[in-house]
Image: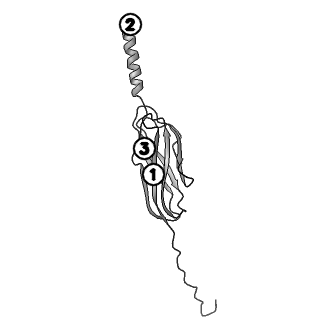
């Protein structure tokens, strides 16, 4: 009987461990900047939650080029906890863009998550300035 109870406990433990895992759930996987002026605010935030039963660890976050810089949370995201992934696109580059950020996590079902930032940066039009009028005193 003791062997049966020990075997049952072992099977229960292994089964529970197999289902205990982290899982990232993102509000959005594509962030649209829209049409923005050159030099506009570069920061966008992807919100996500660990809907798993174990801590979620962001192992790496890489932009597809140097113009897209992600900043992931450094600490593990505990089960049920929400977190932010900050992404900055270099808004000094004029033109349409579509860039990716690849997250590598300890989520066994989805170890790599690809997020997209896109939009268009328009050049800022130079303001027309009128020539200064001289006063009657010659100043």
| Number of the front mark, 2 or 1 | 1
Label 1 secondary element: strand
Q: Is residue 90 above or below residue 101?
A: below
State the CA–CA distance, disc 3 to disc 2.
45 Å
Q: Earlier in the sequence, mark 2 or mark 1?
A: 2
Residue placed at 57% from the left, 88% from the top? 133
Residue count near mark 2 (Cα–Cα under 10 Å), binned few <14, some 14–19, many ≥20: few
Task: Report the quarter where the N terminus lies.
Answer: top left
First-in-chain label (3 vs 1): 3
The mark found on residue 48 in the picture is 3
Disc 2 on helix, strand or loop?
Answer: helix
Mark 3 → mark 1, Cα distance in angstroms: 14 Å
Horizontal side, residue 75 vs residue 138: left or right: left
Residue 97 in percent (x, y) is at 48, 59
The structure residue drawn at horizontal position 48% and vertical position 35%, both measured from the top left corner, is: 106
Residue 64: mark in rendering: none
Q: Do callouts 3 and 1 mark residues in contact (Cβ within 8 Å)? A: no
* Quarter location, residue 81: top left
Q: Position of residue 56 (x, y in %)?
A: 46, 36
**Residue 114 position (above or below residue 35):** above
Label drawn at residue 2: 2
- State the mark number for residue 116: 1
Quadrant into which the C terminus falls: bottom right
Tell me if mark 1 has few (under 14), some (14-19) or many (20+) residues whose alpha carbon lies within 10 angstroms of its own.
some
Residue 52 higher or lower than 127, as above or below: above
Taking the view exactly as shown, the residue that stands out farthest to the bottom is 136
> Residue lying farthest right?
139
Mark closest to the chain's N terminus, 3 or 2: 2
Q: Are marks 2 and 1 in contact (CB under 8 Å)?
A: no
What is the C-alpha distance between the residues marked 2 and 1?
55 Å
Q: Is residue 56 above or below residue 127?
A: above
């Amino acid at each position: 009987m003791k062997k049966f109870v020990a075997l049952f406990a072992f099977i229960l433990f292994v089964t529970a461990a197999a289902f205990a895992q982290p899982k990232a759930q993102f509000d959005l996987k594509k962030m649209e900047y829209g049409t923005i002026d050159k030099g506009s605010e570069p920061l966008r935030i992807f919100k996500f939650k660990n809907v798993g039963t174990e801590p979620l660890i962001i192992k790496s976050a890489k932009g597809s080029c140097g113009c897209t810089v992600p900043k992931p949370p450094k600490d593990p995201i505990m089960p049920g906890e929400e977190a932010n992934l900050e992404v900055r696109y270099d808004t000094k580059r004029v033109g349409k863009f579509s860039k990716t950020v690849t997250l590598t996590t300890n989520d066994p079902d989805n170890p790599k998550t690809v997020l997209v930032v896109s939009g268009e940066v328009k050049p800022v039009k130079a303001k027309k300035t009128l020539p200064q009028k001289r006063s009657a005193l010659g100043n």
